[in-house]
Amino acid sequence: MPDLKRVLKKIAKLFTHNWQWKLLSLFLAICLWSGLITQDDTLTREKIFSDVAINITNSDTLRRNGFIIVSGLDALPTARIHVDVPQKNYNTVNASNYNLRVDLSRIREAGEQTLPVLSSSSSNYGTVTSISVDAITVQVDEYITRSRIPVRINTTGDVPSGYYAGEAQVDPAYVVVSGPRSVVENVVRCVADYDLSTLGTTSGTERTAVPFRLVDGDGNTIDSALIDVTTQNVSLDSIIVTQTLYTAKNLVINTSDLVSGSPASGYVIRRISAEPATLEAA
């Protein structure tokens, strides 16, 4: 037992002798070890990102190739990704460093297409090891263009009292529509909805920007969310209607001078009337 006590005292003295220096040495050793670990690119740690947005790329390229997405991209899900990150950048990386995306330039034909969700890897930010959403299914249609679609006016409302409206003119008179073949083929005209009650109360020429819609042969409005309407390569969001207002006046028909001569023998003129009794002049 005395020998055990002497051993324990020696061990205690070993730890307590110059303990400040020993503690400092341990701290420095830990710092040096941590520094070496973080600078070693071969050492990685797994990091998980949730609710990562998936980007859509090369939409313009897809249209140049003659195709357009008609469904499948309106409500893209978010993804959960697992990444092996180098130790030195573990605390600085974020989800955008891995650029989750769907590349539309991979599409080569119409119909249902399944596109893989791609990611980026690098020596600085590491490698994506798994993605919860690995593919997106979309419906593809041919992208076509039709020119010289006529613009017509759908007039509603009444001209302000005391004025007369001449024939309205539209600008442009024709438009170009581009979009999915299944939709664009049904377009027969562009209709500008023009409300006469919005005109001012001053005679002269007035120009108004009005909304428009695309209609089929039966007059039904076509959903134009996927259609581009242009004129001379400029996108349109309204049609310009030019309208001239004239001051109007009601004229009473003078019946006293409507007849000449005398009635035949045996007849008497009892009353002369005009229908309508007034005329509007502008």
Image (cartoon, rainbow, N blue to C red):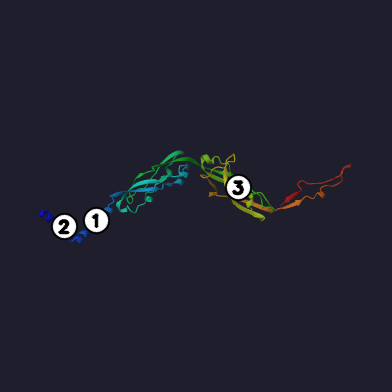
**Quarter where residue 146 is shown:** top right
Q: What amino acid type should be assigned to the residue bearing mark 2?
A: Ala
Q: Which residue lies furthest to the left in this view?
A: 2
> Badge 2 is on which residue?
12
Q: Position of residue 176 (x, y in %)?
A: 55, 45
Evaluate if marks 3 and 1 touch, with contact meaning CB atoms under 8 Å apart: no
Residue 39 seen in render: no
Question: Which of label 2 and label 1 is nearer to you?
Answer: 2
Q: Which of 50 and 102 is in front in this view?
A: 50
Q: Which residue lies furthest to the top in this view?
A: 111
Could you tell which of marks 3 and 1 lies nearer the N-terminus? 1
> Badge 1 is on which residue?
30
Position of 4 compared to 204: left or right?
A: left
Secondary structure at badge 1 equals helix
Q: Distance between the residues labelled 2 and 1?
A: 23 Å
Q: How far apart are marks 3 and 1 (CA)?
A: 77 Å
Q: Residue furthest front?
A: 1
**Quarter where residue 133 is shown:** top left
Q: How far apart are marks 3 and 2 (CA)?
A: 96 Å
Disc 3 crowd rating (10 Å Cα; few below 14, some 14-19, many 20+) is some
> Badge 3 is on which residue?
193
Q: What amino acid type should be assigned to the residue bearing mark 1?
A: Ile
Q: Position of residue 42 (x, y in %)?
A: 28, 49
Secondary structure at badge 2 equals helix
Q: Where is residue 213 in the image (x, y as percent from the top left)?
A: 57, 45
Secondary structure at badge 3 equals strand
Disc 1 crowd rating (10 Å Cα; few below 14, some 14-19, many 20+) is few
Q: What amino acid type should be assigned to the residue bearing mark 3?
A: Asp
